[in-house]
Image (spheres, rainbow, N blue to C red):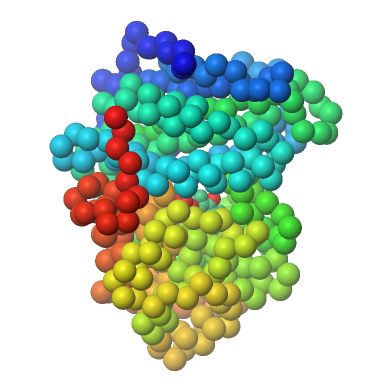
Amino acid sequence: MIHTQKTTASKIDSIDFNNLVFGKTFTDHMFVCHYKNGQWQTPEIKPYQPLTLDPSASVFHYGQAIFEGMKAFKDDHGKVWLFRPDENYRRFNRSAHRLQIPEFPKEFFFEGLNQLLKLDQAWIQSGIGNSLYIRPFVFASQPTVQASASNEYIFMIICAPVSTYYSGGEINVLIAEEYSRAANGGVGYAKAAGNYAAQFYPTSEALKKGYQQIIWTDADRHEYLEEAGTMNVFFKIGETLITAPTNDRILDGITRKSIIAIAKSMGVTVEERPIKVSELVAAHKEGTLQEVFGTGTAVVVLPITSFSYKETAYKLPQTNLLAETLKKQLVGIQYNTIEDTFGWTVAVT
Ligand SMILES: *Cc1c(COP(=O)(O)O)cnc(C)c1O
């Protein structure tokens, strides 16, 4: 069903797998499927290569585009695993729906993914921290500057070998008091391309001031803690783990829901509820704020070393972190070194 054209010149021997920069190196092949005349056409796998698009292609003007982020892992026996790919597929179509993009068929998605990974499996290095970052995306390709939903789209999957995302060191975050990431009724819950474009300016301003990330707060009053950059965010106060409930402003992270499930299975109390900046500051003053950490596919779990709010920096303890215990458990499941009692991992065959 999928038309496959293999590369005749693999790039793999030119890659230094010990010095990968996140998201800059791509495998030999890509998956492409065009939508026109009201339907998805025959999918293709072909050598990774540039695209040719009309300058009027709708995505350049109106940003009708969404994406996913997922990973494949190679265990010590050389077997390749995906982590909860059904969740990525579902979320892809939730995002597509919100952006008025036609749903992508399930059998194309999974067959394309499986075949692409089989073809490029030599690009996946075993060993904790090494993985293949998989980027499915779709964009409006109709040549028109008419401001309406496109009637042509291109769906693609590209893959990038990666090793550990953040190179360690301090993660100082700034709690947003001016800019917002998402609004009620908006597209915050979707992986819509424009959500990220709109974060770059405030984030670069924060970087200049020495912060690595912004913790986004609600757009109305900047009172509630919502997400950390492009991660979901957790707070450990006393022995309780707290994270904001998902809604139309918050991305329903797969790492988030996996961490909640693992924490609960370990007997940790988890509360999914709105949490105010004032509660965080008060807990820090009382000495009950133990940890703040972000979660996402790229980083898995990222402990935050300090947060700043109204010109005051609050340092966070960095020893005996629950974040590290949870990460170890999740990573163990992903690399098939810990038994997956949740039924999350799917073998590439
Ligand atoms: C992708 C993303 C996350 C994390 O989702 P995962 O499924 O865990 O990778 C969190 N927040 C935002 C804004 C995201 O785009």
Whole-percent x, y for residue 110 in the image: 44, 32
From the viewer's perspective, is 150 left or right of 147? left
Closer to us: 304 or 96 = 96
Whole-percent x, y for residue 215 in the image: 55, 65
Q: How many numbered markers are drawn? A: 0
From the viewer's perspective, is 186 left or right of 190? right
Residue furthest to the right: 146
Closer to us: 331 or 225 = 331
From the viewer's perspective, is 16 left or right of 276? left
Closer to us: 16 or 208 = 16
Residue furthest to the top: 8
Residue at horizontal 62%, vertical 62%? 247
Query: Based on the displayed image, in which of its 4 quarters is residue 114 positioned?
Result: top left
Decide: is 149 above or below 38.
below
Residue furthest to the bottom: 286
Residue at horizontal 44%, vertical 26%? 112
Decide: is 52 above or below 261.
above
Query: Based on the displayed image, in which of its 4 quarters is residue 151 positioned?
Result: top right
Q: Is residue 99 visible?
A: yes
Residue at horizontal 61%, vertical 73%? 224
Decide: is 102 above or below 193.
above
Whole-percent x, y for residue 46 in the image: 45, 15
Q: Is residue 321 visible?
A: no
From the viewer's perspective, is 126 left or right of 246? left
Closer to us: 342 or 204 = 342
Q: Quadrant of the C terminus?
A: top left
Whole-percent x, y for residue 320 in the image: 26, 74
Residue at horizontal 84%, vertical 28%? 146
